[in-house]
Each structure stands twice: as structure tokens, then as C-alpha cells.
Image (cartoon, rainbow, N blue to C red):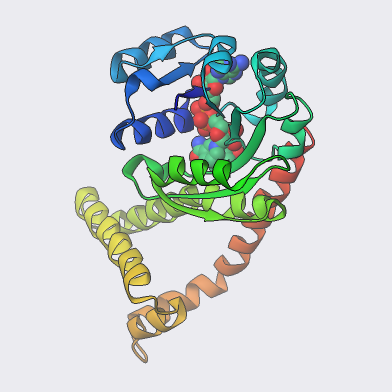
Amino acid sequence: MSTAIIGAGVMGETLLSGLVRAGRRVDQLMVGEKRSERARELEERYGVAVVSNREAAAKADTVALVVKPQDMGDVLDEIAPELRPGQLVVSLAAGITTAFIEARVPEGVAVVRVMPNTPALVDEGMAAISPGSHCDEAHLAEVEALMASTGKVLRIPEKQMDAVTAISGSGPAYIFFVVESMIEAGVHLGLPRATATELVVQTLVGSATMLRETGTHPVVLREQVTSPGGTTASALRELEVHKVRAAFLAAMEAARNRSRELAEGS
Ligand SMILES: NC(=O)C1=CN([C@@H]2O[C@H](COP(=O)(O)OP(=O)(O)OC[C@H]3O[C@@H](n4cnc5c(N)ncnc54)[C@H](O)[C@@H]3O)[C@@H](O)[C@H]2O)C=CC1
Ligand SMILES: O=C(O)[C@@H]1CCC=N1
């Protein structure tokens, strides 16, 4: 089964490298990429064939669209004449609905929508997938296998996609922002930057591993750290005073709303 990736930016390369790491034969992969310098870079790095979007659509069994939401209409119009029933189109774009894609491809082409995230680059990705209306179990299972090569996969109803995008799609950026803030605070407290970075990164990995391996509720884990009258209680009070919880709610609502706007083409 051959797979084409159209749009090989950050997320397109993440998918490509995951497939290569998972043992997919490079001669069964191809890339369509507008920027010629970027295309050459990927050819050199992975030995993958870079072809036109139309050739990719004509030759591949599965066509993964990883361009920006705003470019999706043009790309679909370009490749639609090459697509045929039985092929599978997978969109990784925020906001773009399966109905939007189905309206632009020939009938009988199956469509699956995916929301991936960048930790897929280290095989710790979280992808959510939703079937379009002409998609059967085999198509969904194929996309599940495709994304499982880079991490976890969850099947969700498409109406949850905007909220999922706000959590796991954009989520790594929130975490990196928190990490960056903690490192800067450590430097402010007088620690060398390298020391602060090592302390923060390992604390993050350790906390994430505890959440995953114990399955314990985060409130319980937080209470275990919070000694009565101690340092953590003082710190947490400041986070509440500065409304960090409310800020996360507002931020994720904004991301969810932006995903809805992208669906409308803005
Ligand atoms: N970066 C992320 O963390 C995530 C991104 N996504 C989705 O992935 C998609 C791509 O995002 P990024 O990789 O971050 O953007 P990007 O800007 O890094 O990559 C887009 C790529 O598409 C190429 N491109 C644009 N028009 C094209 C065309 N007509 N034909 C072929 N290639 C074309 C661009 O040259 C660029 O390399 C977006 O729809 C985004 O919503 C989804 C989840 C996470
Ligand atoms: O920022 C964005 O629009 C994309 C979708 C989720 C993560 N990055």
C-alpha cells in the first residue's frame, strides 16, 4: 500500500519520519511539497520521492493532506481530477471537516480526519481520528495503524474534533510554555540555566510518567506533594491568585473557537 504526504512542513515530516521509523518501505512513500528547497531536503534526508501533488494523488492508495487549513481548498481542487473511488484521503488539518473534503473529491473516495500532535516525532504522539460518511471499518483501521506508528490513537466522533484540537493538538505548546516559564523562574532564583533546564525537564517527565503509570487522579498526586504549611502550598496559592486555572480554560476555549473559524475558511 503506497502513501503520499502532501505538505511536508513540521507535521508532514513528523508523519513521514514516523512511517520510516515504523519500517514502511521508502519506495512506497511519496511527498508533494510546494517549496522546492524543502522538497530537496526531504529527498536527501529520507530518500523519499518528491512528486507533484497530482502525481501523488494519482499513484498513492492513501493520500495524507498536511497543508495549512487555508490551503486545503486549493489542494483539493488540484488533486480531485486524479482521485478515484477506493482511495483514502486523510486530512491532518485543524478545523477542516470531512464534509468539506467529501464535497470536493469524487464519490467513493473515503475520507478520515485526524488531529495529531508533534510528540509523534518521538513516538509519543496522541492522535484522534474520525471517519467521514463513506468510510468503512477497514479505512479507519488503516488510519489507526498509520498513526499508531507514532503513538496513541483514539477514535472520536467528529463533533469533538475542535475540542480535541484545543487539548492534544495545541497542547504540547502549552506544556512547552510552562516549561519555559519554570526554567526562567529557576534562573531568576539564581540557578545556572543548564541546571534549571535539567531539573524542570526531568520533573516534567517524572510527573507525566506517574500520571500514566499509576493512573492516579492528578488532584491526589498534587496533594501528595503539598505538605501542610510547606513550600508547595505557598506556590499553589500564587498560581490560584494569578488565575492560572482560569487562564487555561480561556486559552483552550480560544483554541476551540479558532478551530471552528478555520472550518469556515477564515
Ligand atoms: N504543527 C502542529 O503541531 C500540528 C499541525 N497540524 C496541522 O497540520 C497542517 C500543517 O501544519 P504545519 O506542518 O505546522 O505547517 P507548515 O507550514 O510547517 O507545513 C505546511 C507545508 O505545506 C506546504 N504547502 C503549502 N501549500 C502547498 C501545496 N499547494 N502543495 C504542496 N505543499 C504545500 C508548505 O510549503 C509547508 O511545507 C495544518 O493543517 C495544521 O492544522 C495538526 C496538528 C498539530
Ligand atoms: O496551531 C495550529 O493551528 C495547529 C493545529 C494544532 C496544533 N497546531
How many labels were placed on the picture?
Answer: 0
In this rendering, is residue 58 above or below 64? above
Residue 257: x, y in percent?
Answer: 73, 49
Residue at image position (43%, 56%) is 178
In this rendering, is residue 264 above or below 78? below
Residue at image position (60%, 34%) is 91
In this rendering, is residue 236 above or below 201? below
Quadrant that contains the C terminus:
top right
Residue at image position (37%, 58%) is 182
Residue 203: x, y in percent?
Answer: 28, 64
Residue 230: x, y in percent?
Answer: 34, 86
* Residue 9 seen in this snapshot: yes
Residue 76: x, y in percent?
Answer: 69, 21
* Residue 266 seen in this snapshot: no
User: Of residues 215 and 108, which is closer to you in this image?
Assistant: 108
Q: Is residue 163 left or right of residue 35?
A: right
Q: Is residue 46 left or right of residue 112?
A: left
Quadrant that contains the N terminus:
top left
Residue at image position (53%, 9%) is 52
User: Of residues 256 and 1, which is closer to you in this image?
Assistant: 1
In this rendering, is residue 146 above or below 159? above
Snapshot quadrant of residue 121: top left
Picture quadrant of ligand 2: top right
Q: Is residue 157 left or right of residue 180?
A: right
